Amino acid sequence: MNYIKVDLDRQLGSIHPHIFGGFAEHLGRCFYGGIYEPGSALADEHGFRKDVLEALSRLQMPIVRYPGGNFVSGYRWMDGIGPVEARPARPELAWETIETNHFGTNEFIQFCRKIKTEPYFVVNCGDGDMREARDWVEYCNSSQETALVKLRRQHGFDAPHNVKYWGIGNEVDGEWQIGYKTPEEYARAYKEFAKVMRWVDPSIKLLASAVSNWSAEFVERTQLLLDQASDFIDYLAIHWYVGNPENDFANYMTVSEFFDERIGVAEGMLKAMKVQRNIQRPISIAVDEWNVWYRARGETLAERNNLEEIYNLEDALVVAMHFKAFIRHCQTVKMANIAQIVNVIAPIFTSPDGLFLQTIFYPFELYSRTCGNIALDPFWKGDTFSAGKHTALRTLDVSASLDEAKKSVVIFVVNRSQTDALETTISLDSGFFAGKVQAHVINGSDIKATNSFNQPNQVGVKTAVLTAERSRLNYTFEPHSVTALECQID
Ligand code: AHR
């Protein structure tokens, strides 16, 4: 028997909606042949695939990072503005292809408006310089009578785009990056880029590329960055990708501990430096690239250009567990961006004729649609499992949120057992269940179930309506499932 206790008074803090962010890179078929396909019968008058926009809108992403990723470290944003026929094609070194620049800044802004999301731009801190970075801020955000503002107006955008979030560099700590930077080089470049970008627009929020290479000396790197540039940092950005290369389901399910460890490490570094350097300003954590990615790792040239990972049910469980980590660390994690959003390691997969929703689409949609604005601190006990280096982990992975205005509590549960349905008693303290509970369950026939064009519904979500007693609800969580119990409360 399992037992979950949710106390409405045990609150962890506010959940920032940006934890449901996305990331779209000029890579493979993310834009070209995915989001953007002028001439397609499925495209709107601006060339955007209507079916893709509709699917993306279901995910309710409040923010999307652009244009890379590794791509940005060789990107000249000015190549991607103005009349499309005049834009230069360039060799693209990060993913070994040719970038036509048919999609660029203004197309991305249009895209954001269409799916009601906010843009988050990353500037080139690889082979780009601070002049290009500050010019981009000016082109996007200024309304002064300058040449770049006139140019934006000529391009059809009278009002500023008001891009608030700007990252400086991508994965600068990796040798794979164009313009890899040593800790000293990045700390210095970051500060100088940030300074002039802020001089152009003092209202922007800046993200520093802190850790993606977890096997390098990231502690010293982060320390140096905070030591030299803390006045210019609003977020420390960290990245990770996970997978199940050993095909060991139980071990894969322990990845929740990895998320806690990585976020905890970033929190610890931040806390220590705040004390040591008496840093008063708030600095948050952005996990601005995260996902499952281990199959399409780029062993062939076609893969290197595409990264078209096909997800299964166990990956969907892992995506759900990410949200548990972000919800529990809500005081520090104020942004997270699934990498990526269409075709390239993504929840949406297209062909010229249509699309299907990958398994990982469903947990993203469920959490972003139902999650309240306050994180609760539920207590739970019951069945356990051991795998890899972990012993006695609770089989249920639980998080909960409250929305006081809507009078709703959502209890999110991942049942990490491959075989067992887990009977559970859920009790509510400091409030009462008020009648109906909607139980949304994501599941499929087995942990390796995948969706495809031929079989698009092998994994999906089903909703049932239940009735709770005043303070108690009995529920049995299906094996290998993700459940959100959306409960009205008094
Ligand atoms: O998302 C794919 C790639 O993963 C990104 O370009 C890079 O930042 C990371 O290594």
Image: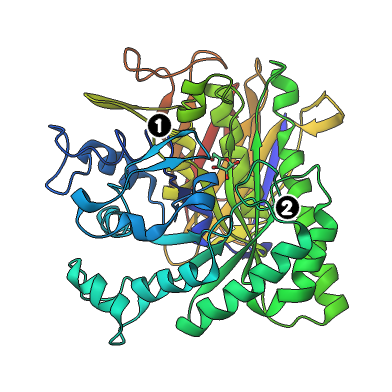
Residue at position x 72%, y 17% in the image = 246
Q: Quadrant of the N terminus?
A: top right
> Percent x, y for residue 23?
47, 48
Q: Work out whether residue 422 or residue 50 is closer to the camera in this orientation and state it.
A: 50
Percent across and percent down for residue 151 are 25, 72
Q: Nearer the viewer, residue 192 or 287?
A: 192
Nearer to the camera, 205 or 147: 147
Query: Helix, strand, or loop for circle 2?
Result: helix
Is residue 310 in view? no
Determine whether the beta carbon of the residue marked 1 sits less than 8 angstroms from the nearest atom of ligand 1: no
- The verdict on label 2 being within 8 Å of ligand 1 is no
Give x and y (percent) for residue 382.
76, 32
**In screen coordinates, is 132 left or right of 125?**
left
> Where is 177 relative to 317, above or below?
below
Q: Secondary structure at mark 1?
A: loop
Type of amino acid under label 2: Ile
Which numbered tag is attached to residue 263?
A: 2
Q: Which residue is mark 1?
A: 343
- Please state if 245 lies on the left or on the right of 165 as rendered: right
> Which quadrant of the picture is home to ligand 1?
top right
At horizontal 70% and vertical 28% (from top left) the residue drawn is 253
Q: Are circles 1 and 2 on residues that touch, CB within 8 Å? A: no
**Of callouts 1 and 2, the N-terminal one:** 2
- Disc 2 crowd, CA 10 A, few/some/many (<14, 14-19, 20+): some
Q: Please indicate, yes or no, whether residue 430 appears anywhere in the rendered image.
A: yes
Left or right: 187, with 165 as reference point:
right
Residue type for callout 1: Asn
CA distance separating discs 1 and 2: 27 Å
Q: Nearer the viewer, mark 1 or mark 2?
A: 1
Q: How would you rate the neighbour count of disc 1 (Cα within 10 Å): few for under 14, some for 14-19, many for 20 or more?
A: many
Report whether 343 appears left or right of 235.
left
Looking at the image, residue 200 lies above or below residue 409: below
